[in-house]
Amino acid sequence: GGAKSRLWSRILCDLFQAPCSVPASCDASFGSALLAGVGIGVFPDAETAIRRSLKISRQLEPDRSQAAFYERQFALYRRLHDALAPVYAEM
């Protein structure tokens, strides 16, 4: 899925202008296995399960030059959303 995409990870990091840690395993089954481990007592809680098991494959720092681009795009999205709200209400 999207979590495995280098491009999507980069977009999210730049969009939120925050450092991002990309996990080595992005499969939902990994999270399910950790929660099962909590359920049967292997881990005392989800936070401990994550801390002990999660491996980070790469760290990303935001590209500050992209902030203005995403701010403009979000402003455009808000204008479109507000303009189309009456149309959505009729659907």
Image (cartoon, helix red, strand yellow):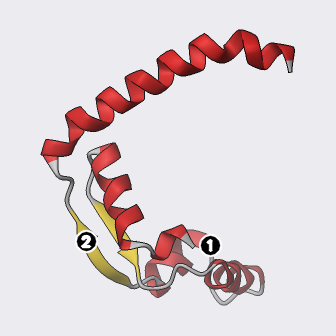
**Which amino acid, by three-letter code, is at mark 2?**
Gln
- On residue 59, the disc is 2
Q: What's the residue at 36%, 66% (across, down)?
A: 7
* In the displayed structure image, the side of residue 15 where residue 81 appears, left or right: right
Quadrant location of the N terminus? bottom right
Q: What's the residue at 68%, 14% (across, down)?
A: 85
Label 1 Cα neighbours within 10 Å, binned few <14 / some 14-19 / many ≥20? some
Q: 75 or 50: nearer the eye?
A: 75
- On residue 45, the disc is 1
Which of marks 1 and 2 precedes in the sequence?
A: 1
* In the displayed structure image, the side of residue 87 where residue 90 appears, left or right: right
Quadrant location of the C terminus? top right
Q: 23 or 7: nearer the eye?
A: 7
Whether label 2 touches label 1, CB < 8 Å: no
Q: Secondary structure at mark 1?
A: loop
Q: What's the residue at 48%, 86% (across, down)?
A: 53
Q: Secondary structure at mark 2?
A: strand
Is 33 placed above or below 78 here? below
How many numbered marks have been drawn onto this rendered protein structure?
2
**Which amino acid, by three-letter code, is at mark 1?**
Asp
Is 24 placed above or below 7 here? below
Q: 30 or 87: nearer the eye?
A: 87
- On residue 20, the disc is none
